[in-house]
Image (cartoon, rainbow, N blue to C red):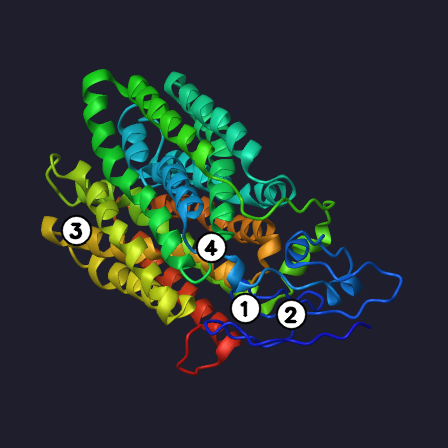
């Protein structure tokens, strides 16, 4: 068996086991570990560093043991024209994809009061919850396509499918038509764009990765400010169908920019589809705890986005103020996505995630439940927007921290696929609770806060698996 010697580890990551043993992926932030292998005389001379980045994926546990090390920290640009252009393209992509997800409350409120007024809120919420589910779950497929072929054609095909799906939403009038167009077709394109953009950005930043993701994720928050106000005004002036078409044309322009600027730094790493590779992800304790924590957090996170408008109306808030709740929530989340990212690169990504997850659960249980006044609801929207915003920017960086950068597409895709089940079931469960409580939102709010608190416990466990309870950067 080949022997290896390891250099010093990156200062911002904790290692427990040697990298590249079977089922134990190296943390990308610890990519500073370099490995040299004594080869037989019959083999070719040692490969240079660029060859290492092109290393094929080991297909068996025996090959994984001897796999070469991934890129070192010095290979990540962490800035420069190309890196910032990729970040800008990612910002545009998230404005169009996750940004629309931030506006699901607008669709929920409109469908319940207009197009689908004959259906109860729980049934209607399956449209938006499935939309979120599909965008996240399909990452398990998009991630593999990204690793094999890169982002170019994923972005192009995704753009066409996404815009087409939105155009079909503008023509839909029945429940099944809206469901197929918005929850299935549009979400397929949205997922391709969203995951290809995230996986591309990972390869350009290391030391400032969380900050970069925070800036990129702020695009979705900006959309959450612009789109609800834009849609509310346009629906009154030109109707819902033409409003959706206007949104689709806006997205088309921004996605053209994304297609021109987003690219991967590392070349594609083609490898056959092997189910075991996905299953091995769940043998990594750190990865499993991180994914389960994210699942529980996402289970509750979208409930305020979906129901705060309806809850505010039920609490007697002025109809002129209700449409501005989502813009307020998303405007504050711009800071919530950027500032935690900046802090995470310096204090530790798991450390910061635990803090913002605790804050989100506390804001729901201690503020959203007891307050009934207009000022109290607005205060909750602002506070929750800040705390929950950090989750969107930090979740992919946590997965990247406990993953091998060369397989980042598959690892992030697998993680988001599991989280998607939380997004799928959270809103319908919340709607069912409201119906069972005869219109009261207290049960929904308790469910939201409790599942987020459970997520905190798993994040703490994931941190403990890496560094115990030591006060250190993790």
Residue nearest the viewer, comparing 183 with 242? 242
**Left or right for 109, reference 415:** left
Say which label, 4 or 1, has the lower sequence index. 1
Residue hosting label 2: 19
Say which label, 2 or 1, has the lower sequence index. 2
Say which label, 3 or 1, has the lower sequence index. 1
Frontmost of labels 2 and 4 is 4
Disc 3 from disc 4: Cα separation? 43 Å
> Which residue lies at the image location 51% right of the left edge and 65% below the top edge?
29
Above or below: residue 221 compared with residue 356: above
Does the residue at mark 2 contact the one at mark 1 (Cβ under 8 Å)?
yes
Image position, residue 144 (x, y; %): 63, 44
Q: Residues within 10 Å of mark 2 (few under 14, many from 20)?
A: many
SS for dot 4: loop
> Which residue lies at the image location 42% right of the left edge and 58% below the top edge?
209
- Using the rendered image of the protein, determine whether residue 291 is visible from the camera's viewpoint: no
Q: Give the quarter of the figure containing the N terminus.
A: bottom right
Residue hosting label 3: 377
Image position, residue 13 (x, y; %): 49, 72
SS for dot 2: loop
SS for dot 3: helix
Residue hosting label 1: 30
Residue hosting label 4: 77
Image position, residue 365 (x, y; %): 27, 62
Frontmost of labels 4 and 1 is 4
Above or below: residue 403 compared with residue 435: below
Residue 350's disc is: none
Image position, residue 259 (x, y; %): 46, 32
């Amino acid at each position: 068996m080949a022997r290896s010697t390891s250099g010093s580890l990156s200062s911002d990551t904790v290692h427990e086991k040697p990298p590249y043993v079977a089922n134990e992926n190296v943390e990308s932030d610890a990519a500073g570990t370099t490995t040299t292998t004594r080869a037989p005389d019959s083999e070719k001379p040692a490969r240079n560093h660029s060859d290492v980045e092109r290393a094929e994926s080991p297909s068996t546990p025996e090959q994984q043991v001897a796999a070469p090390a991934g890129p070192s920290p010095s290979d990540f640009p962490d800035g420069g024209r190309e890196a910032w252009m990729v970040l800008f393209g990612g910002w545009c992509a998230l404005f169009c994809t996750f940004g629309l997800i931030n506006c699901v409350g607008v669709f929920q409120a409109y469908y319940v009061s207009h197009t689908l007024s004959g259906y109860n809120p729980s049934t209607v919420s399956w449209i938006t919850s499935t939309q979120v589910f599909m965008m996240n779950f399909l990452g398990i497929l998009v991630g593999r396509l990204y690793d094999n072929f890169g982002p170019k054609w994923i972005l192009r095909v995704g753009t066409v499918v996404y815009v087409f799906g939105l155009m079909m939403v503008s023509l839909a009038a029945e429940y099944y038509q809206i469901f197929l167009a918005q929850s299935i077709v549009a979400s397929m394109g949205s997922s391709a764009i969203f995951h290809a953009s995230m996986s591309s950005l990972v390869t350009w930043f290391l030391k400032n990765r969380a900050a970069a993701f925070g800036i990129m994720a702020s695009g979705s928050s900006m959309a959450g400010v612009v789109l609800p106000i834009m849609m509310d005004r346009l629906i009154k002036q030109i109707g819902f169908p033409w409003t959706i078409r206007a949104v689709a044309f806006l997205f088309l322009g921004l996605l053209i920019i994304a297609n021109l600027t987003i690219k991967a730094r590392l070349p594609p790493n083609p490898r056959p589809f092997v189910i075991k590779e996905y299953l091995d992800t769940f043998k990594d304790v750190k990865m499993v705890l991180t994914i389960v924590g994210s699942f529980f957090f996402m289970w509750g996170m979208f409930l305020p986005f979906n129901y705060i408008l309806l809850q505010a109306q039920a609490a007697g808030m002025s109809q002129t103020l209700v449409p501005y709740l989502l813009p307020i929530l998303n405007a504050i989340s711009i800071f919530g996505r950027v500032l935690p990212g900046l802090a995470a690169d310096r204090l530790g990504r798991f450390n910061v995630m635990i803090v913002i997850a605790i804050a989100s659960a506390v804001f729901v249980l201690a503020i959203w439940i007891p307050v009934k006044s207009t000022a109290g609801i607005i205060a909750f929207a602002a506070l929750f927007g800040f705390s929950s915003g950090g989750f969107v920017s930090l979740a992919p960086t946590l997965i990247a921290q406990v993953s091998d950068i060369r397989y980042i597409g598959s690892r992030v895709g697998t993680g988001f696929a599991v989280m998607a089940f939380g997004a799928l079931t959270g809103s319908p469960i919340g709607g069912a609770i409201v119906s069972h409580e005869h219109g009261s939102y207290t049960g929904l709010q308790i469910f939201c806060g409790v599942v987020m608190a459970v997520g905190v416990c798993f994040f703490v466990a994931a941190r403990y698996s890496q560094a115990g309870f030591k006060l250190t950067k993790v």
